[in-house]
Amino acid sequence: MGEFILQKEESTGTHFISYNIIMSKILITGAGGYIGSVATDLFLSRGYEVVGLDNFQTGYREPLEFLKNKYPNQFRYYEADLKNNLSPIFEKEKNISAVIHYAASCVVDESVKNPGKYFFNNVAVTANLLSHMDRYEIKNIIFSSTCAVYGEAEYYPIDEKHPLNPTTPYGASKKMAEDVIQWYGKLKQFNFMILRYFNVCGATEDGSIGDSKKPSSLLVQNAVRGALGIEKFYLTCPEVDTPDKTPIRDYIDVVDLNLAHLKAVEYLFKNKKSEIINLGTGTGSSVLEVVNQVKKLTGVEIPVEKGNTRSGDDAKKIADITKAEKLLGWKPSKTIEDSVKSLIVWYKNHPQGWKS
């Protein structure tokens, strides 16, 4: 199982060689979710064969049906819960080269109220997936982790050597899942890439795939929805020790984020070396700065209402992305403005997101 197979063709007369690149087969968990569906589209567009898994509790069939019609020979998906026996799928889908594990529970304030759900869905379920991968000799995994594993930042920007002191069950559950993956690396010779996301925003440039959570737990999405009159926009962040008293975050576009996953897969295939890497932009914006950007691009004075302050927010998180740039040859290209523009297109076309 390599990165790709080259099939050569030659013509008579004018001599030429054409290459039909057949890429590896990739399994994507959480394929019907926001980030997973954008990833599925990206990997398919680059020629990979993709197998999608989702239990559709928070993900959607509609984007996967859209992609199935767009790439009928490259894409299949299964309704499956990762806590269950996955052997029938792995028996059917031979020669999977890597797994990209997006599926997770990922709402910070919910994790504070219902920690058991997060430790089960993010830790036990990951262990079950790894067990199946080991059984079927799939040794490459890219894991969707989070900057929440760091907790309150001790210095800025945050690099991968920063102490891990999560302040919420969500962050703790992701740290524990990272530990499980690293043990599989030590004991089972897995090659892993743990990617710690900062704050994700945006949609595909053509507005065909985006965030469908209603309401989204993500600031930029909610601000755009508020500006477009889809639903009221509530500020739920706590007052913190920053210049404008709102949290500062590193916002990364979902397309840039998934381009890094593409680079991570290529890196694992080529180097067979495990790494932990931050994914952000290396710059920060406050909540109020983001809201003002949305106001500027939509021309709408967003009616902002103060909601209940959510639990578990830290004052500031900005990524050091030096390692991503050096090892993956990756650098984000999109700005907050780009992300807001793509979200405006997405929500104008899909004001209520996917239907099913």
Image: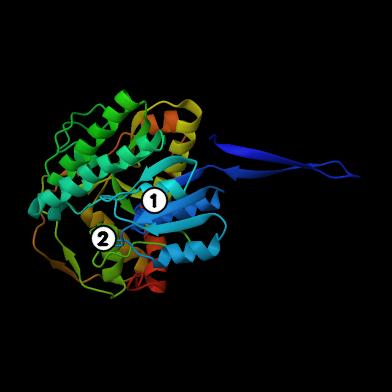
Residue underneath mark 1: 88
Q: Is residue 255 left or right of residue 101?
A: right
Q: Quick check: can you spot residue 85?
A: yes
Give the quadrant of the C terminus: bottom left
Q: Is residue 345 left or right of residue 296?
A: right
Disc 1, SS: helix
The answer to whether residue 4 is above or below residue 115 is above
Q: Farthest residue toward the bottom?
A: 229
Give coordinates of residue 98: x percent, y percent: 44, 39
Q: Residues within 10 Å of mark 2 (few under 14, many from 20)?
A: many
**Residue at the limit of the structure toward the top, as seen here:** 186
Please tell me which residue is depicted at 30% across the width and 24% down the height of the picture: 187
Residue drawn at the location 29% of the way across and 37% of the way down: 319
- From the top left corner, tell me how far across and down residue 146 is, in percent: 26, 42
- Other residues around mark 1 within 10 Å, as few (<14) / some (14–19) / many (≥20): few
* Residue type at numbered disc 2: Val
State how far apart marks 2 and 1 are (Cα): 47 Å
Q: 324 or 302: nearer the eye?
A: 324
* Residue 27 vs residue 345, the one in the foreground: 27
Say which residue appears at 36% left-offset and 35% top-offset: 134
Residue located beneath label 2 in the image: 291
- The earlier-in-sequence mark between 2 and 1 is 1
Q: Residue at x 8, y 54 (%)?
A: 113
Image location of residue 225, percent across then percent down? 29, 69
Residue flagged by tag 1: what amino acid is it?
Pro
Q: Do the numbered discs 2 and 1 sit on residues whose CB atoms are within 8 Å?
A: no
